[in-house]
Image (tube, rainbow, N blue to C red):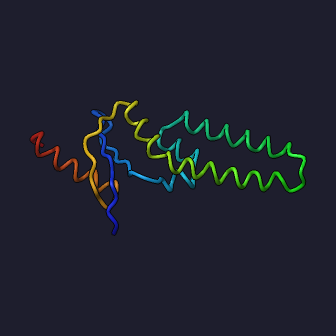
Amino acid sequence: MWLMQYDVYKHPVIGYEAVKQGFSWPAFFFNWLWAFVKKMWIEGLVIIGVYVIVYIIAETCPVKGGPEIIIIVVQLGISIFIGKMGNEWRRDSLKKRGFEHLKTVFAESPDAAIAIVARSSGASEGI
């Protein structure tokens, strides 16, 4: 399995979260739903708002067949942008919610990254 780079955060009450560095495929495919699952309410609402605006603009397009092409191209562009920015937005969201960045590690999965950091910080905290 491939090793990916993860930023590991810890909240005093909620616990650990790991965020992969790089492109977010879940954000690319599931956009606003992904944002809501990750508790990024404003980002999710903005994404929905952008899609509604794109749909309205496409529907008012006077060119026959134009709306479908516009919607497909713009949605793809939006999805690529969200996939590119998604993990950065998630890191910012965690910081705003009181998570502290502990360490950046290479691991096979988010759970493995958390385990690596928890073991290393647990040893230093006497756990």
Please provide percent x and percent y for residue 17: 34, 44
Q: Is residue 125 left or right of residue 38?
A: left
Q: Which quadrant is home to the N terminus?
A: bottom left
Q: Residue at x 49, y 46 (%)?
A: 86
Please provide percent x and percent y for residue 50: 67, 39
Q: Residue at x 89, y 51 (%)?
A: 63
**In the displayed structure, would residue 13 be above or below residue 70?**
above
Q: Is residue 90 left or right of residue 63?
A: left
Please provide percent x and percent y for residue 106: 28, 56
Q: So how many labels did they put on this image? A: 0
On the image, which quarter does residue 46 sit in? top right
Residue most extreme to the bottom: 1
**In the displayed structure, would residue 119 be above or below residue 56?**
below
Q: Residue at x 33, y 51 (%)?
A: 6
Q: Which quadrant is home to the C terminus?
A: top left
Q: Residue at x 86, y 56 (%)?
A: 65
